[in-house]
Amino acid sequence: MINDVDFQRIINHLFNSCSFFLVYYYIFGMRLCLMTKKRKIYCGLGFLVLSVEMLFEHSLSHISYFSIICYLWLLYWATGEKLEKCARIWMLTFWSLADLECVIHNWLDAFWVERDYWNDILTYIVIITFLSIIAIVGSLHKKIRPIETTAKIGWLLAFLMAMMTLVLVYCMNVLKFVIEKNYRSIGSVYILIGGVILCVLISLIAYFSNDVTHRKEENEILQAFTYQQRDLFEEKLRIEEDTRCFRHDIKNELYIIKGLCDQKRYKELEEYIDEILDSETFFSIKNVYSGNRTLDILLNAYLNKLKGILDIKVKGKVDDNLSVSDRDLCLIFANLLSNAVEAASVSGDNPWIRIKFIQGKQSLTIFVENSISRERVEEIKNLLDLRTTKEDTRLHGYGIEKVKRYTEKIGGIYRTYFLEDGYGAEVSIPLVVK
């Protein structure tokens, strides 16, 4: 027959298990489509180990070793993933608190320490310490001087992981020796010290892991801007060279036209003018103009070489002097064009691209729509693979998530949508006309 104590234990297990599964599903289940096969395996292992620990909390306390290691790895992975920041911090904190409490209880059960009022107090002290460290690190995030290189952070993370293992081994061995001598008070102190150190190390690992991720993102943005600036510079040089050639050639052409007029050879003059108008070597094919120099250079650089291959239409006008910087405009629009060209080029028959600019008093809205293959539609809908298929990943591997990041950085709005026969992206950029 089940007594009140056993019934309460069963209820606690059910509550803890349900809360754990809900948290795990929210963090990883809803984002499972974003994971690679390797990360799915890691998450599956972590899920299995933590589930076993939750179900056999009172009999398999030694699983805490492996549980903590898996938890640290998942924490290191999750802090670098593109989750919503608030939900990520909240859910990871909740998960870590539940796991820490479970570990502390396992330590007590492993050495036959009775759970009483004081042990619960120690558990809550450790949890409050963990929350306090998170709050302090969050408030001092901008004040702490960053480490100079990512390599140093990597060594620091390795050191913290080693310290974590040593702390676990030390606490377990010392607790076993002390508690066997019936020094309960000393054992409780060691539990408190070990739990606090554990919280500190986990917090440091999470903080520096985020720092590494932030540095990688900054390097990607800087690299993207560098390559886009190079393309802009090369396109400007090409336009200047074409202009010089045009000025040189037009002078000679006008001499010939004048000579034909003087000789009243009007039939030959008409044929000569028709030949000039039909000549692509004389008049540049760079005839896509939006009114903004940065946008014009990008439009001509990406689209003119695809004329005859893609059906391209551009509508709208944009002022040249805008409050948004050329760098931000370049990064956003260049990646939009790159994504559209890539998708349309492999979309099958009758590929097309539609670009539309709408400038208001307070915002600039850019629509980029393109044809897309059915396979790519399924990939985007399932969020399985948003990466580029281009071979030159240095220049074009920045994708949809990069456009979203650049847009949100300047306070803009980015959204995507599906058409009957294509895919579209809309970017709204706040601005004030200078």
Image (cartoon, rainbow, N blue to C red):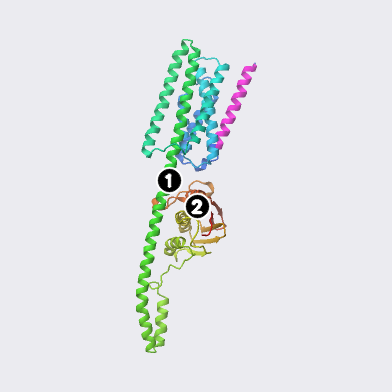
Circles 2 and 1 in contact, beta carbons < 8 Å? no
Q: Amino acid at mark 1?
A: Glu
Residue 100, placed above or below residue 77: above
Q: Amino acid at mark 2?
A: Arg
Q: Nearer the viewer, residue 311 or 349?
A: 311
**How far from the left and from the top, in percent, is residue 388?**
44, 51
Residue 293, placed above or below residue 128: below
**How far from the left and from the top, in percent, is residue 23?**
56, 34
Q: Which mark is residue 218?
A: 1
Total labels: the figure holds: 2
Q: The N terminus appears in which quarter of the rendering?
A: top right
Q: Main secondary structure of the magenta part?
A: helix
**How far from the left and from the top, in percent, is residue 310?**
47, 63
Residue 61, placed above or below residue 367: above
Q: Which residue is mark 2?
A: 376
- Asked if residue 5 lies in the magenta stretch, the reply is yes
Q: CA distance from mark 2 to mark 1?
A: 28 Å
**How far from the left and from the top, in percent, is residue 423?**
53, 55
Is residue 239 visible in the rendered image? The answer is: yes
In the figure, residue 251 lies in which quadrant? bottom left
Q: Mark 2 against mark 1, which lies toward the viewer?
A: 1
Is residue 56 visible in the rendered image? The answer is: no
User: Magenta residues?
Assistant: 3-26
**Element type at marker 1?**
helix
Query: Which comes before the other along the chain, label 2 or label 1?
Result: 1
